[in-house]
Amino acid sequence: MTPTPTAVLSSAGVSIWLDDLSRERINSGAFKRLIEELNVVGVTTNPSIFAAALKKGESYAAQVGALANAGADVDRAVFDITTHDVAQACDIFAEEAKRTNGVDGRVSIEVDPRLARDTAGTIEEAKRLHAKVQRTNVLIKIPATVEGLEAISTTLAAGISVNVTLIFSLERYREVINAFMVGLEQAKENGHDLATIHSVASFFVSRVDAEIDKRLDALGTEEAAALRGKAGLANARLAYQVYEEAFGSERWKVLAAAGARPQRPLWASTGVKDPAYPDTLYVTGLVAEGVVNTMPEKTLEATADHGDITGDTVTGTYADSNEILDRLENIGISYKEIVDLLEEEGLDKFVASWGELLETVTTALDSAKG
């Protein structure tokens, strides 16, 4: 039999994670097909995903009712509901985690984004989430803000695996890798087994194109039009170059000799936002050894149906990728301005999504109280 596109993608070194989670999906056994037929080996979540899940079905009614009867406030209810789902998903992927020594089979849960500028609060919440889920294959998601860097290091130093999220710039990505290595160096001093500590760095892709394309369209020139849809891939490919350099360094070799595993790049925001682009653009264009691609279900199904996986599409592209960013600067589109804006907007969206989740759970609690 001819291997499926997702099987070919996996063979090329890309771990396929689903960017979605719901209790209905857990209870229905839907993950079984995703694992067996579409090569899914992990899950990421966010507040929008949980809010949508809560609005859709009745699978949360019993737990919401129990929380309402116990007098739980909305923050406790959100904490209990989301950690319950993540723990169950961790159990579904436990076999994959065992098979890969914890590299895959991972399920992510996000620290309250309202704490993104609060280092101490993020650390405390990361530890609370980890203790509540009580699964070795959970990843705690921490945003890559300036304040989040120390929180990343401290959480890793405590032996807790981390998904660093909301990375847009190459400079911030370098800082994230440094925070990761600092965390492992401290974990080693603290007596932790480095082989048990895992991390991914979530580099956002499609949002870069969405913002830059708006500006290119406003310019209205032929040169601007020729650059549409190219910045997201170029930026991510250069991030992989940063990854290769950092994890080939002498500093890393010392940690690797002590059993450490590299922090893998994770391509996030891989659903195409412009319908003019191929729906698998941020999958087929970002194939490289040792990365994760977390896909919305629509992108996953499109990849399985007609993804044209032709091998590595990242290494060897660095000169062209740099040229694309240079050409953008030359026509007045500032890379730094874009990535700074996207981080701020990304945080605002995370907080707004968290507010939506709180509102959804508040409505459910009120309804359960009758």
Image (cartoon, rainbow, N blue to C red):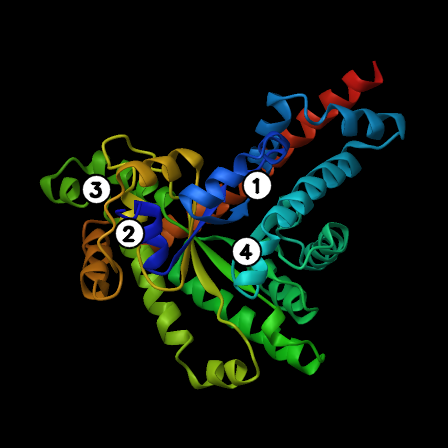
Q: In what element is the residue under mark 1?
A: loop
- Among the two numbered marks 4 and 1 on one chain, the one whose residue lies closer to the N terminus: 1
Disc 2 and disc 3: Cα gap in Å?
11 Å
Q: In what element is the residue under mark 3?
A: loop
Image position of 258 (left or right of 291) = right
| Residue bearing mark 4 | 96
Of labels 1 and 3, the one closer to you: 1
Q: Position of residue 228 (x, y in %)?
A: 21, 42
Q: In what element is the residue under mark 2?
A: helix
Image position of 332 (left or right of 133) = left
Quadrant of the rendered image containing residue 367: top right
Name the kind of residue labelled 4 in the image: Glu
Disc 1 and disc 3: Cα gap in Å?
28 Å
Name the kind of residue labelled 1 in the image: Asn
Please tell me which residue is depicted at 48% across the width and 71% down the height of the picture. Answer: 262
- Among the two numbered marks 3 and 4 on one chain, the one whose residue lies closer to the N terminus: 4
| Residue bearing mark 1 | 46
Name the kind of residue labelled 3 in the image: Arg
| Residue bearing mark 3 | 228
Q: Position of residue 335 (x, y in %)?
A: 32, 54
Disc 3 and disc 4: Cα gap in Å?
39 Å
Disc 1 and disc 2: Cα gap in Å?
23 Å
Please tell me which residue is depicted at 64% across the width and 27% down the height of the picture. Answer: 54
Q: In what element is the residue under mark 4?
A: helix
- Among the two numbered marks 2 and 3 on one chain, the one whose residue lies closer to the N terminus: 3
Query: Callout 2 environment at 10 Å: few (<14), some (14 to 19), or many (20+)?
Result: many
Disc 2 and disc 4: Cα gap in Å?
29 Å
Position of 276 relative to 191 (above/below): above
- Among the two numbered marks 2 and 4 on one chain, the one whose residue lies closer to the N terminus: 4
Of labels 4 and 1, the one closer to you: 4
